[in-house]
Amino acid sequence: MALDDSSISSAERARRDFKRRKKNKSVGLAMLSTLAFAAFVWFGLLATPGWQRVETSFFNWEVAIEAFPRVFDGLLLNLRVLVAAAFLVLITGLLLAIFRTLKSPVFFPLRVLSRGYVDLFRGLPLIIVLYLVGFGIPGLRLEFLGRVPAEVLGTIALTLTYSAYVSEVFRAGIESVHSSQRLAARSLGLSYSKSMRLVVLPQAVRKVIPPLMNDFVALQKDVGLISVLGAVDAVRGAQIEAAKFANFTPYVVAGLLFVLLAIPTVRLADRISRKYSEREQMGSTL
Amino acid sequence: MINWDKPRLRVTGLKKHYGDRVVIDGVDLEVFPGQIVALIGASGSGKSTLLKCLNLIEEISDGQIFLDDEEISAPGVDEDEIRAKIGLVFQSFNLFSHLSIMDNITLALKHVKGMSKEEATKIAQKWLDRIGLGDRGDSYPDKVSGGQQQRSAIARAVAMDPKVLLLDEVTSALDPELVGEVLDLIRDLKKTGTTILMATHELAFAREVADWVIFLEQGKIYEANEAKEFFANPQQERTKAFLSRMAL
Ligand SMILES: Nc1ncnc2c1ncn2[C@@H]1O[C@H](COP(=O)(O)OP(=O)(O)OP(=O)(O)O)[C@@H](O)[C@H]1O
Ligand SMILES: [Mg+2]
């Protein structure tokens, strides 16, 4: 917009004035409706008969401050589990996906096994996997393992379940790489494994980053479930504090912490998805 | 230019079927070093399938393929090694979209021929200069025109120094104004003695550049002749019908 007001034609000035008026009008409208909505929710909530009780048992400042340290410590455990599980899931999921795309008859058992694995763990509710692993593995009484901490068992259960999801994402990504890219790689003399490593996987990984981010956000919430095995994470910490004060506020604190943790990831996921879908569209035009 | 001593590529009794569907039905052909052979025929006549069989990307159903003296269709040959000696360029989507044009060309030089990065880059740069993209090596395929993409794909194939270059309708996905630059590159390759077998529906170009023309119909060679003679004096009824359909 190098043009200043004096050099533009009257027609353009009229257009700009019109656009500005229109924009001001929409901004005003948005503000008004937001205010109206907020007021509606606020007064609606205050007007409910039980609000007084809910406020003291769920939104109690003193309890929140008292409970915060333990809940926060617990969250650090969740974070550690998250990082470990995410790392293990990526590796296991990718391997499962590769096993499923192997064509050679030599790999038949591997292919069938990974397929069965994915079917099983995509169907099993995570909570059941947690119980089976959490109480099943210690039940085996393997002396050399010693006492396996609950968070480790939780990480194993999360990895088992999420690897199944993530392997499906990877497999879809591998299959979505245009077949002529594979042919082009093979026609240059690259072996199957080299064309996989140098051509197919790098392209597949780009395509699966957005859905992987979604699974990561889901995992971020589900790490809270390791508390059912007795790991003292944010949820379990909140539980302990809640019992101490006979008040539910610690759960709200834990919930808010999880949300705060998720917001950056969700935003990042959106940004990355947008970026890659743009590139995808450009790439597909010849 | 053409060395008539011994064929570079020799195909005898080649057949290919998918299930019951016969797509290549007993093809014999020879391509001599330095020769340019054009493969023409209607859509579905089997041109792409034939080229893919020659590159061993498709498994053949019968017949034999020889590259120089080696039977490349023999059981137990190292197919990857053979493919590295035979360049193949498709109609479109040739370039690896996640790699720059330079890296597209150097990939196989490094990972198939085992060259160092410096060696590979030197060869790639030489080819980029030759196709007029000397300063575009860092660009990604989606940032250059379709014609530039196809020229890069051809450069990637010839940079491997193949014994024979197979081109499958490399201009048919291009806008008309971009076709010329790709055809110019093929003319240029002819001057340096590259051996080429190309499926094309650019009949005028085939007449100008090809030494020999093969007409394929329903997986069979119906007629083959020297280019000038083929177009001036088609012998078979089907050939005449095809040529008049293509309005030449
Ligand atoms: N994988 C496949 N399975 C079954 N049939 C196939 C397969 N690939 C090709 N065909 C069939 O083989 C025949 C020849 O196909 P091909 O692609 O070789 O023809 P073409 O001469 O290259 O045609 P075009 O000029 O349209 O590229 C077609 O009838 C096609 O349907
Ligand atoms: Mg074809």
Image: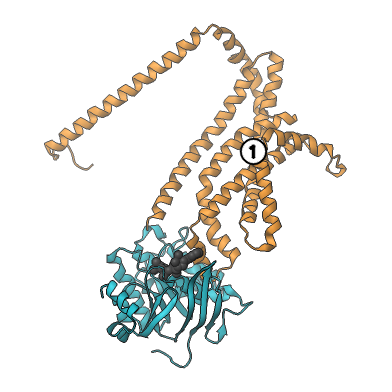
Chain colours: A orange, B cyan
Q: Residue furthest top?
A: A49
The residue positioned 57% from the left and 32% from the top of the image is A261
Count of numbered tags:
1
Marked residue chain, label 1: A
Residue A34 in the image, given as x and y percentages of width and height = 38, 20
Q: Position of residue B214 (x, y in %)?
A: 39, 80
Quarter of the image with the N terminus of chain A is top left
Residue at (64%, 77%) from the top-left corner? B76
x and y percentages locating residue A90 in the rendered image: 62, 47
Is B1 placed left or right of B59 in the picture? left
> Which image quarter: residue A12?
top left
Q: Residues within 10 Å of mark 1 (few under 14, many from 20)?
A: many
* The one of A277 and B9 positioned closer to us in this rendering: B9
Q: Amino acid at mark 1?
A: Leu
The reply to whether residue A191 is visible in this rendering is: yes
Q: Is residue A214 above or below residue B39?
A: above
**Callout 1: SS:** helix
- Residue that sits furthest to the left in the current view: A10
Instruction: Confirm whether residue B125 shows in the render.
Output: no
Question: Considering only vertical position in the picture, is A66 above or below B114?
Answer: above
Residue beneath the point at 42% across and 14% down: A39
Q: Quadrant of the C terminus of chain A?
A: bottom left
Is label 1 within 8 A of ligand 1 (CB to nearest ligand atom)? no
Which residue is nearer to you in this view: A283 or A247?
A283
Along the viewing direction, whichever of A169 and B155 lies nearer the viewer:
A169
Q: Does B136 appear above or below A169? A: below
Residue behind mark 1? A82
Residue B136 image point, x, y percent: 38, 64
Residue most toward the bottom?
Answer: B5
